[in-house]
Every structure is written in structure tokens, then in C-alpha cells.
Image (spheres, grey):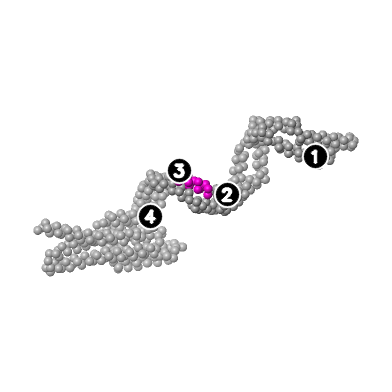
Amino acid sequence: MGSDGAAASAGSASGSSDAAPGSASGSPDAAPGSDGSVAGSSSDDATTSGRASRATSGAGAAPGRSPRTRTTLPGFAYTEADEEKQRGVRRMKLTALGLLVFVAIVFALATWAGKAGAGPWTGYVAAAAEAGMVGALADWFAVTALFRHPLGIPIPHTAIIPNKKDQLGASLGSFVGENFLSGDVVRARLRALGIGGRLGSWLAEPAHADRVTAELSTALRGALTVLRDSDVQAVVGEAITRRADNAEIAPGVGKTLQKVVADGAHHRAVDLVCARAHDWLVLHSDSVMDAVEGGAPGWTPRFVDRKVGERVYRELLRFVTEMRDMPGHPARGAIDRFLTDFAADLQSDTDTRARVERMKSDLLARSEVQDVIASAWSSVRAMIMSAAEDDRSELRLRARSSLLSLGARLASDGRLQSKLEGWIEDAAVYVVTTYRAEITSLISDTVASWDAEHTSRKIEAHIGRDLQFIRINGTVVGALAGLLIYTVAHALGG
């Protein structure tokens, strides 16, 4: 009576991830009285204590358990909370046993009174008490059969949880996979949550935006701290070098130079070069004349070499001065034409482009350039770390502003909400459909790794108190049914 409901409850509880052994319920060979009697519980206490002692002192004990842990077992720990639940189970067992004893006494007294001629009422009482005993014993058997063999007799289809633990775990895993890890279920549940609007309203609060900004800053600092500078520098340097080496720069440089010449932006550079050249010639006239004299033939007189040097210097100074002061100087026009032709060659001349690419590769291969590229990471890292630590930095202020703006948009923009929720739903569905087997196997494998007896005891500690009500209800319902049957039979029999 009520065994089906008890089995269903026990089967559901067997998949509970917090189940642990150590329940001090009746021993496997306990009689009906031991399922709820003090004697049976005391015997189990001794058994459990012995197991606890062996598990604690034996080689199988797991180190590092909490001082509150009473029993150390593979995958389980019998805790103070389990003891409290077990005390409740004992009380309910005692109540159910007391009710069984009560109806047995009533049956005995009613039978004795009936034989003593007390009256026809004794038959009704005896019938009710007799049926109550039958109901109590039947439901005792049903409840006990979930966790152990009643009276220690290996009756088929008893000790269901210890014997069917692995099947229950596999069934639970399949049930979760089919009914909870379904793409449609996950998508419908996420859609019902309205994540986009709720997230937007939450982010739109300045305090929440500040909190998220602070958390992101902490995470960013942590990530930058964990990263090794040498590794990042090597990666960054290789990435920049490879990208620069693969990209042809000549056409781009040619287009830029063409634009600069067309806009006349190079005139300032020409002005600067002419001014610097003029100043240098004024200060270093002797150097120019010495260079001319040094290149003269040895048979020419020295005063002739001197005169030639002075003439060359004056002409050179005059040329540079005129070029500096005359925007329309022919030499300036020649420079313009040269730069224009060079810009065109950079874009279309194969030989010029190849020479520029070789120069670029040679430049990138130089150790000085590689050092500059590598050192850029250190500067960027220091800048980011400093900005992340300063709550008034531009980085954090912009991040906060972006979060507030995003929150306001999410709270009011239905299309953005739908887009975000679609991304979240797609990601969640992908995870549960791709890794459903791994998730369900985690359940079944975990249950399979539990010790069968300890699992049974732990489950009984969690649901045993409620199961004792089945025994109580069986006694009461049996008594009422017996009384009704006896009454109907008596009425029909005249």
C-alpha cells in the first residue's frame, strides 16, 4: 500500500547531487519492529559508528575533510545536517511502530472481549484492527524494500535503490537530458526570462554600471598581471612584423606622396631643408673650401685652388639663398617634378616597388626595430594598468558611460533586446545540444561512483521521514477498509 509512491519518491531522490551515506536506519536483517523501533536504530547506530571509525582510520579515508565531517566515504560525507534528518526518521519510525503495536493490542483485546461475550461490537473493532495490522505490515514491507531486503531475506525486487542505483542514475541522466537539456525548453525558458530588458534596466542604474566597471577593471588588471611580458612581446612583435612584411607598402606610400605633392604640403619640408643648408654654409665656409682644395690636382698652385674654392662657396651659398627665398625657384620646380614622378613609380613601376619592399624587409629585420616593437607592449600595458586602477581615468569613465548607454538602449529598444536575447538563446542551445551527452553522463557517472549501501542510507536519511507517513496512512486506511468490508459483509450476510 503506497509502495509505488514511495518508489517514485526514492527514485527521484536517488539522483540528488547532495545525497550522502550514513543513515542510521534499520539493519538489513531487521524485523518489522526494527524499522521503527529504538532497538533497531541503536543497532544501526553501532554499525554506522563502526563504519565511520573504519573509514576515518583506514587507508581509504580522504584527507583534508572538515572537522564537522563524521564519516568519510567515496563521494560522501555524513554531516551534522544528516544526523538531524536521521533523528527525524527515527522519531517517525517509532511513531509508525507504535501505531502498529497499538492496533495489535486492540486486535488482541477485541478478540478476547468477543470470546468473552462482550457483544457484537467487538467484531467490528477486531476487523478494523486486523486490517490495520495488515496495512501496516504491507507498507512496512514496501518502504523497507526500497532500501534493503526485509528481514534480510533476498526477496526478488527488494533493496531496489542499492540494486538499481546505476540504472536510476542512468535514467535520471536521460530524463534530465530529454526534458531539461532540450533546445526548445532552454530557448523557451530564456525567452520567458526577458534577459535583454532586465539586463538593460539593471545596467542603466549608475551604481550597477560602476560595479560592472570596477569588476571589469579588476579582471583586466588580473589578466595583464598573469600575462608574461616576454611572451606577449614575442607574439606582438611577430604579429606586427609578419603583417608589415606581408603588406606591400609602396603603392600606399606612392598615393600618400602624390597627395602631399598635389596639396603642396611638402613645401614646408623644402623650406626647412633650404634654411638649414643656408645656415650650415654660413657657419662652415672653411669646410666647403677645404673640400674643393682637397679635390684639386696636385700640380695646380695653392692660391688657384683657394680662389676656386671661394668661388664655389659663393655660388653654392647664392644658390641655396635664392632657393630659400624664391618660392618659384627652378630647383623647387625640379623637386616637385621628381616627387611627382617618384610617387607614380611607387604605384606603377615594378622595379621601384620591389626595391622599396626590400628596404622595408631589411628595416624590419634590424634588431633596433624589433626592440622598438617589443617595447611598445610594455608602454601599452603600463598605460592600461594605470587607467584601470584610476576610477577617474578616461578609460573607466568611457567604459562606465558606454555601459550606461547600453543599459538605456537595452531597456527601451525592443529590437536590441531581441537581438541580444537571440544571441544568448543560440549560445545556450548550442551548449546544451552539443554537450548534452557530457552533462548527462556527469549525472549517471557520478551516481555510478557512489557506494550502493551508503547511497541507500543517505537517501533514506533525506526522505525516510516522509516515507514513514506511508506506513501510518497504511495502518489507518487499512483499518477503515477492514471496518467497511466487515460491515458490508455483515450487512449482506444478515
Q: Amino acid at mark 3?
A: Asp
Q: Is residue 117 left or right of residue 158?
A: left
Residue 357 occupies quadrant: top right
Sooner in the amino-acid sequence: mark 4 or mark 3: 3
Sooner in the amino-acid sequence: mark 1 or mark 2: 1
Q: Callout 3 environment at 10 Å: few (<14), some (14 to 19), or many (20+)?
A: some
Which mark lies nearer to you, 2 or 4?
Answer: 2
The verdict on residue 404 being magenta is: yes
Q: Disc number at residue 281?
A: 1
The local secondary structure at tag 4 comes to helix
Which quarter shows the N terminus?
Answer: bottom left
Residue 269 occupies quadrant: top right
Can residue 62 be seen here? The reply is: yes
Q: Amino acid at mark 2?
A: Glu
For mark 2, what is the residue? 394
Q: Residue at left 44%, top 63%?
A: 66
Q: Position of residue 144 (x, y in %)?
A: 29, 60
C-beta proximity under 8 Å, tags 2 and 3: no
The verdict on residue 37 being magenta is: no
Q: Amino acid at mark 4?
A: Val
Judged from this view, the residue extending furthest toward the left is 494
For mark 4, what is the residue? 447
Most common SS among magenta residues:
helix
Please state the extent of the stretch shown in magenta in the rendering: 400-412
